[in-house]
Image (cartoon, helix red, strand yellow):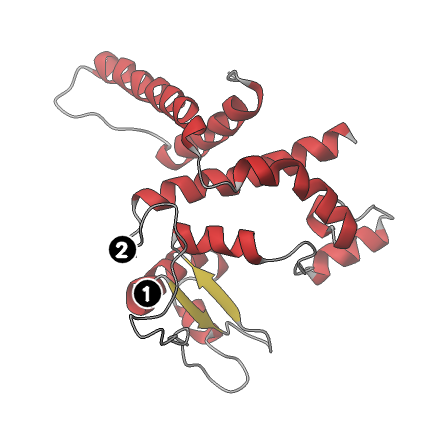
Amino acid sequence: TFFHSMVFCLKYLYNIIWLKFCKIFDNTGCVSQKVCKFENDRNIVYPIPVVKGLPVVGTIVDLVAAGGAPKLHLYIDKRHTEYGEIFRERLGGTEEGIFVSSANLMRAVFMHEGSHPRHPLPEAWLLYNKENNCQRGLFFMEGEEWFHNRRILSRLLLNGNLDWMNWHVKQQSNRLIQKWLRESEVQKTSGFLICNLEEQLYRWSIDIIISVMFGETSD
């Protein structure tokens, strides 16, 4: 349906936009538009670093001590400073997660995951869909269904050239900056306090996605 297509586009564009921002801060030393590989001049491939944990619970104790699920993004960011742009960690259970912070490596994942990648299906979501007799939805797509929807945008978004997004990013960034400047003039103090910064930045990222998709903003 049209709604499902829009949700898919939003999810896909959001990931790609974050890849573009991550590339600005990417410290892997890789040449632009090229995929990083963990190998030296002798073509020796290095293994992905592993965070050691307990036999059964993995590193879930460390995560809880760091603030639990609400602080997961900060926890992973700290791990990246310790282990680099890619590492493996088992936060609990039997499955091991691979965490990536390099924009080039993220792009490599999308380019080499194949036509029918397997996606994790949270048990809570499956139970909700079963109890409420809901369709699987876009977040549960697999096989040909996923490939059909992905193919719509893959050629445009994965060709390595995302410069066409620059105008939309700059437009929304300037819009937010001008808003802050107007608020600073009203306060008329030596300093300026930005209220609800996280909320405003979240709205800013959504405005960029809307601008990319529809060519306009939403107030």
Image coordinates of residue 6 in percent, x first then y, are 67, 31
Q: Which residue is mark 1?
A: 84
Q: Which secondary structure lies at badge 2?
A: loop
Q: Which residue is mark 2?
A: 29
Badge number at residue 180: none
Dot 1 falls on a residue whose secondary structure is loop
Q: Position of residue 191 (x, y in %)?
A: 16, 26
Identify whether 216 is placed above or below 194. Answer: above
How packed mark 2 is, by other alpha carbons closer than 10 Å (few <14, some 14-19, many 20 or more), is few
| Residue sitting at x 40%, y 64% | 86
> Percent from the top left, x then y, of residue 197?
35, 33
Above or below, comparing residue 67 to residue 182 in the picture:
below
Q: Which mark is first along the chain, 2 or 1?
A: 2
For image coordinates 12% across by 22% down, the residue present is 190
Q: Residue furthest right?
A: 133
Q: Nearer the viewer, residue 164 or 97?
A: 164
Gap in Å between the C-alphas at discs 1 and 2?
A: 12 Å
Could you say which is closer to the camera, residue 135 or residue 29? 29
The residue depicted at 72 percent of the width and 62 percent of the height is 123
Displayed quadrant of residue 195: top left
Q: Name the residue: 67% across, 41% down.
A: 151
Q: How many marks?
A: 2
Q: Is residue 37 visible?
A: yes
Image position of 122 (left or right of 67): right
